[in-house]
Image (tube, rainbow, N blue to C red):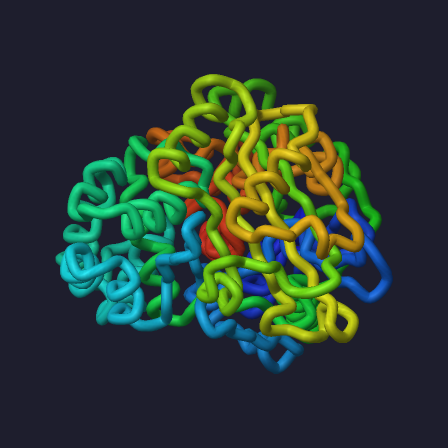
Amino acid sequence: MLDAVVVGAGPNGLTAAVELARRGFSVAVFEARDTVGGGARTEELTLPGFRHDPCSAAHPLAINSPAFRALPLERYGLEWLHAELPMAHPFPDGTAAVLARTVGETAASFGPHDAGAYRRLIKPFLPKWDTLVRDFMSLPMTALPRDPVTLARFGLAGLPPSTLLMRRFRHEPAKALFSGLVAHVMAPLGGLATGAIGLVFALAAHARGWPVARGGSQSLSDALAAYLKDLGGSVHTDYEVKRLDDLPPARAYVFDTSPTALARIAGFGDHYAGYRYGPGVFKVDYALDGPVPWTAKEARAAGTVQVGASSAEIGAALRAVSTEGRAPDKPFLITVQPSVVDPTRAPDGKHVFWAYGHVPHGWTGDLTDTIERQLERFAPGFRDRVLARATAGPPELAARNANYVGGDIASGAASGLQLLLRPRATLFPYNTPHPAVFICSSATPPGPGVHGMPGHNAAKAVWKRLRQT
């Protein structure tokens, strides 16, 4: 009998398996797709030689993850590559705000009136970032914080809505860039703890950047899987689990799945009936004949580019999706251009690029033309560079990755109390009604993003159980 079986080979499932195997437990992972990776995969979606990331591409949370930093993933081929700028936020007039590695360069891009406000916002947290990130990403409510004073100060700044935090800024460059940071989790700007979201992304960039993985996000997943195998674990792909009886006998079962799927497979009925899924995304992967012709020079040097003309436009796009139930006319776009720093991703002189905009949950329309009209405002002539495109709306995203219910790549609405308490209001979020069954997906704390911490935290709950039995 195995000690643990993990269902789902995304970053969280693989991390949970690695953490258990490192402690001497026998572990097997079962994945429905033909390769590991979940939201961290790489495929030729458009033309031969163009390697795209179907979901995650830039990794500010992965490089800062306490879980990943404790693992020897570089030994298994993971290499982080950094663009000149982690992120740029261009404006239609050709100017741009930037999120640079240094606080000073970032503050300077906001103009003299907001530079000081930004420095004062970041200064208390950046020197203590490694301790802070461990505190708010660790197993909730079960461990004493290492730096309770800094954590409390971060809570005072971050728990209120981001709209209150942004009152520190007087001008649009700072307001728009920070609004875009918050919008990465598809939460309305006025929601609970949205200030913390913006702060986390900014601090992550200053601490270690927003890199891409050489060769694509698959490199991260492959490194985790290779390390697991060296530890004695096994990985089985093309193995769809429809019920617990499909799995071999084990002392514990750990699910890197949505709560909905877990309830169906394990027969938990309506245990997660109150769990809410959020807006979906519409994503386009491009094969380009050259780099994106951004008007702002800063955007040409950035790995990630946020596209939204103003904080008001970004807020309106989020409201259209979250409260009005429609696709926005001018969507806020998150775009990543990996080949700016990684030439292995495309043939010589060519580039890969992706962009996504938010759409209502389960939306079935086509946002391609709207996305490209928005891109043309900031990069005139963009369409002339397109060699091929691959589009994916909510139905396609959910078909590729069952955790993306209704196209929700956050695996659950990151708004209201559910941002902090997911998938249920409990001190033991990784436990389920069955004492031998656990959940470790992005539906558990600390939530969405490629950082492995839900898997790391869930593994702690699992090995505690295993040592008791």
Point out the residue furthest to the right here: 48
Q: Is residue 231 visible?
A: no
> What is the count of numbered marks?
0
In which quarter of the view is residue 77 placed? bottom right
Q: Is residue 14 visible?
A: yes
Nearest the eye: 245 or 56:
56
Q: For the point 43% across and 59% down, which residue is it?
A: 88
Q: Nearer the viewer, residue 17 or 10?
A: 10
Q: Image check: 381 left or right of 302?
A: right
For the N terminus, the image quarter is bottom right
What residue is shown at x 36% (from left), y 71% (from top)? 101
* Position in image of residue 272 (x %, y %): 52, 25
Name the foreground residue: 131 vs 464: 131
- Residue 264 is situated, as x and y percent measured from the top left of the image, at 67, 26
Task: Give 208 or 378, whichever is nearer the viewer.
Answer: 378
Q: Is residue 367 left or right of residue 335?
A: right
Q: Residue furthest bottom?
A: 75
Apparent side of residue 105 relative to residue 293 in the rendered image (left or right): left
Relative to 119, residue 56 above or below: above
Please give the name of the residue rendered at 75% of the width and 49% of the height, measured from the top-left corner.
31
Percent coordinates x, y for residue 203 in the rendering:
32, 61
Residue 254 lies, with reference to residue 343, above or below; the image says: above
Q: Position of residue 136 (x, y in %)?
A: 31, 53
Residue in view at x 35 percent, y 29 percent: 416
Kindly indicate the quadrant of the structure image that contains residue 369: top right
In-image side of 278 versus 154 (left or right): right
